[in-house]
Image (cartoon, rainbow, N blue to C red):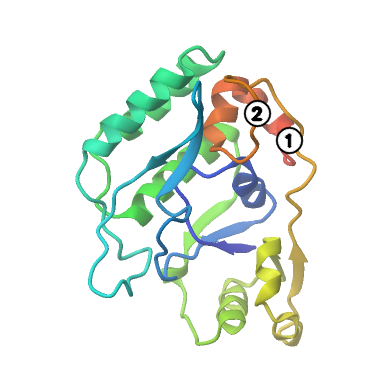
Amino acid sequence: MAIVQSNYIPWKGYFDMIAAVDEFILYDDMQYTRRDWRNRNRIKTPQGVQWLTVPVQVKGKYHQTIRETEIEGTEWANAHWKGLVQNYRRAPHFEEIALWLEPLYLNEPPSHLSQLNRQFIEAICRYLSIQTVVSSSSDYTLVDGKTERLAGICAQAGGTEYVSGPAAKDYVDEEVFNERGIKLTWFDYTGYPEYPQLWGEFAHGVTILDLLFNCGLESSRKMKWVRP
């Protein structure tokens, strides 16, 4: 299993991790962080890589969780969709992806960021036929301690292996997992092939929507997970 904070329209590596586990837990009880991937991601444009950012309300001294973070207004959704149309309408699979993606933008969006992110993540998983169970950290009892909390969630879910991104090596204590009999595995984000991409020099670190618009149902062949 994996436990990761939700991101807005994440990159392909995020979905490879989802596909690699039986249960993927959105860790939205973590503190919301500004200028991060929680509420924004990047697309390709003729002017280079640009951000799409969901405006959110940051209250008080900023000690709010991702799950508590509310979205500011609804105008952003139409602007984001127009940006995607403008920059990807020439992509080979734009119309195919737009059939299920456009309603997510043009129907009334959720009020909270965590709900919005999950909505997009689950829709993309359905398109890619990723069958992994997606759940939330709020479904579990959370204990103190960074590693203790992760291991505790795994234990409650009956997990025997925890898959983590390499950035967590700086703070995860492997011994805590060993004590619970849970194997700790580090996910490898290297070695991705390039794919046909619009607008100049190739960029890996963009939203997975870029890959879907350009490759459609063949997208998984440019990922670590291959669609059955």
Q: Write the residue at 24% across / 51% down.
A: 111
- Of mark 2 and mark 1, the one earlier in the sequence is 2
Q: Write the residue at 54% across / 40% down.
A: 125
Residue type marked 1? Val
Judge whether 80 appears above or below 135 on screen: above
The residue indicated by pointer 2 is: 219
- Left or right of residue 224: residue 17: left
Q: Which quadrant: the N terminus?
A: bottom right
Measured as percent of width and height from the top left, residue 190 is found at 77, 47
Measured as percent of width and height from the top left, residue 178 is found at 76, 83
Q: Which quadrant: the C terminus?
A: top right
Judged from this view, the residue extending furthest toward the right is: 191
Say which of marks 2 and 1 sits in front: 2
Question: Observer-nearest residue: 114 or 35?
Answer: 35
Measured as percent of width and height from the top left, residue 191 is found at 80, 42
Measured as percent of width and height from the top left, residue 15 is found at 61, 45
- Left or right of residue 220: residue 185: right
Question: Observer-nearest residue: 157 or 79?
Answer: 79
Disc sitting over residue 226 in the figure:
1
The span from disc 2 to disc 1 (Cα, nearest Å) is 8 Å
